[in-house]
Amino acid sequence: MKTIRNEIEFKEVCQNNGFHVFMFTTKWCGDCIFIKPFLPSIENQFSNINFYEIDRDDCLDLAREMDILGIPSFVCFKDGKEISRFVSSLRKTKEEIVAYLEKSVREA
C-alpha cells in the first residue's frame, strides 16, 4: 500500500485513470490496527486496484473536505471520479472490506 502524504498527492492520484482505493487511518486507531494484518491479502486479491493509505491526522483538511469523520474509512475512485465509500467509525472485518470492494468493482 502506497502512502499519500498531502492533499496535492491525493489530487494527483485521483486524476489518474484506473481504480484507486484510499484508506483513511491513523497510527493510534485500534480498529485501523486491527485490519492491518489482513490488508496485504486484500491487496493481492484485488491486484488490479491501486491502494493508498492516508493518515487522517496528517491530512486533516483533506479528511474534513471529504467528510471523513470515522476511521478506518475507504473511498474508491475510478478514472478521476469518486464511485463509492465505506465510511464509518465502526470496526471493519476482512469480509466486509472484501464485499465492499467487490461491489465497488462490479458497479464501476
Image (tube, helix red, strand yellow):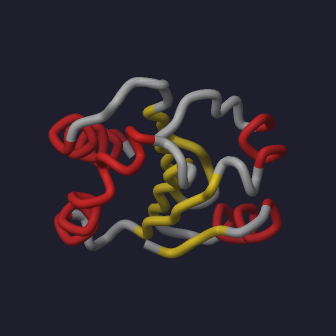
Q: Answer above or below: position of 58 versus 66.
A: below
Q: Is residue 96 left or right of residue 63?
A: left
Q: Is residue 29 left or right of residue 54?
A: left
- Looking at this view, is 24 or 80 the one in front? 24
Find residue 44 and report its image quarter.
bottom left
Counting from the top left corner in percent of width and height, residue 32 is at: 41, 46
- Looking at this view, is 50 or 62 the one in front? 62
Q: Which residue is drawn at 64% across and 33% down?
A: 68
Q: Is residue 24 left or right of residue 72?
A: right
Q: Which residue is drawn at 84% across and 44% down?
A: 61
Q: Which residue is drawn at 48% across and 25% down?
A: 89
- What is the tally of numbered marks visible in this picture? 0
> Which quadrant: the N terminus?
bottom left
Counting from the top left corner in percent of width and height, residue 57 is at: 71, 49
Q: Is residue 6 left or right of residue 21?
A: right
Counting from the top left corner in percent of width and height, residue 88 is at: 48, 25
Counting from the top left corner in percent of width and height, residue 23 is at: 49, 52
Q: Answer above or below: position of 46 versus 82.
A: below
Find residue 16 and report its image quarter.
bottom right
Q: Residue at x 31, y 71 (%)?
A: 48
